[in-house]
Image: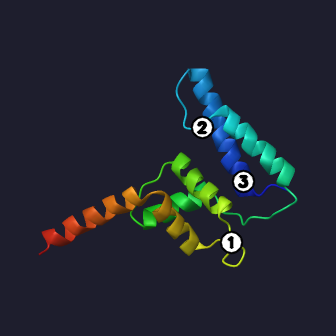
Amino acid sequence: MLTDSQFKQVFFQAKMVITAMINDEPCDFKAEDVLKTLDNLVSNQNNYLLEPWDVDDVIYRAQELGITLTQSEACAVLENIDNHYDANNGINWDVIDCTIEAVYPDKLKERTTILDEIIESFS
């Protein structure tokens, strides 16, 4: 059975692709990739169970870290977690934090620069 998180990710990607096609606009996701993801999820649905984390969790956590992520960027974080899943660690806020920082180091650097400027303004 697909987890809620997996369903939401694929649904979001499919919605983005279809909307882009209807409006004749570019899209972050390719239709072929969405179909491949769906095929993989359906064929492997009994082989593993992932915890129910979703895009909103990643966006919320990024905001807690002072980082702004789009929904497609949050999907990329979840995909990275899925691809590097370690059953010994599971999925928790620390894993999400580390993955956000690993996938988007430039956004972390931007946050650090802004914090440094704020600190300097009080000196």
Distance between the Cα atoms at labels 3 and 1?
A: 17 Å
Quadrant where the image shows the C terminus? bottom left
Q: Which residue is mark 3?
A: 6
Q: Which mark is residue 86?
A: 1
Distance between the Cα atoms at labels 1 and 2?
A: 26 Å
79 to 88, vertically: above or below: above
Residue 17 picture quarter: top right
Q: Which residue is mark 2?
A: 29
Residue in the picture at 38% in, 57% down = 107
**SS at badge 1:** loop
Q: Nearer the viewer, mark 1 or mark 2?
A: 1
Q: Which residue is at the far bottom?
A: 88
Distance between the Cα atoms at labels 2 and 3?
A: 16 Å
Q: Which residue is at the far right?
A: 46
**Is tag 1's residue or tag 2's residue first in the polypeptide sequence?**
2
Q: Nearer the viewer, mark 3 or mark 1?
A: 1
The residue carrying pointer 1 sits among few (fewer than 14), some (14 to 19) or many (20 or more) residues within 10 Å by Cα, namely few
Q: Nearer the viewer, mark 2 or mark 3?
A: 2
Residue 66, horizontal then vertical, whole percent: 38, 63
What's the residue type where badge 2 is placed? Phe
Residue 25, horizontal then vertical, whole percent: 53, 25
Residue in the picture at 65% in, 71% down = 91
Relative to 85, is 60 on the left or the right?
Answer: left
